[in-house]
Image: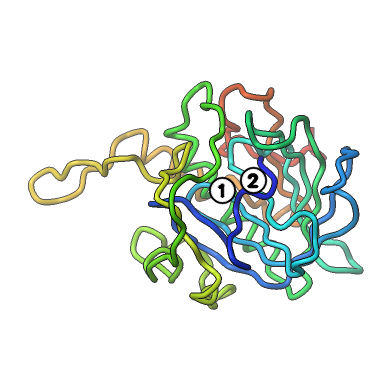
Amino acid sequence: MSVNTAHAQGGVLIFAGERILLYCDDVELGFDGSNESEFKGHKKGRLYLTTHRVIFNAASSKESMQSFSMPFYCMREIELEQPIFGANYIKGKIISEQGGKWQGVVKIKMWFTAGGAIEFGQAMLRAGQLASRYQAQQPPPYSPPQGPVYQAPPPMYTPQYGNYNWVPFNTFPNAPPAQQVYMTESPPPYPGIEPTAPPQPMNGHPQESAADAKAREAAGSAFYNPSAPHNVYMPQQPPYGAPPSYADVADKKNQ
């Protein structure tokens, strides 16, 4: 997790090669467990699910926290809540990245005032599970984006089908405005949902490894239990250890 490293010129700042999967413009973010001034009060703004992380951008230019970056491997104890009264929300814990301008653990809540919390949470868990296949045992220290910043080309923020048919584009059909998406020449400091090099084809057809098949099967069923629709969980992991196992999601109320 890093603070104020994922925004530029009033928009979101992504790494070279990072792709935005979902965009939601009606989100409120709250924190608990930190005395840092940036974490005080509720923040209103936009939420981006990318191939590498979740990014919050504040709607107001006066907000001290303009951006909040949450890589998948920094997420802990994620729960998806559906209260009878009030908007659905996602809660959990985020650990800081080494070099991310803040240290420690903070509790978060993300409210989706226009709906879509379940769908966003499912896609977030699926993306995190896929990314965990390529995560190193010890993530490198975080380095803020370097080099010039420029507007990202449309493939970096428009819906991509095919291998991304698990992304709920019908719930979040809008792409972020082009003038709100910027890119740096720096590559992501941690892996995303795809390997650096795609699998080599065999006899003209892409080959799916046993690990990929197992991950795909697990991701397809792990993140949402219809018999217990009020909660979705991610297991707790020690800071800076192995990435969270998104396939081990379970309903803690049944334990």
Instruction: Between residue 8 and residue 241, name the one nearer to us.
Output: 8
Q: Which residue is mark 2?
A: 70
Q: Is residue 236 above or below residue 199?
A: above
Extreme-front residue of the structure: 148
Q: Is residue 197 left or right of residue 152?
A: left
Residue 129: give x, y in percent of width and height. Answer: 52, 41
Q: Which residue is mark 1?
A: 53
Q: Amino acid at mark 1?
A: Arg
Which residue is depicted at the point 55% across and 65% down? 22
Q: Is residue 117 left or right of residue 160?
A: right
Q: Quadrant of residue 113?
A: bottom right
Which residue is depicted at the point 53% across and 27% down? 139
Q: Amino acid at mark 2?
A: Met
Residue 217: give x, y in percent of width and height. Answer: 45, 44
Which residue is depicted at the point 52% across and 75% down? 179
Q: Secondary structure at mark 2?
A: strand
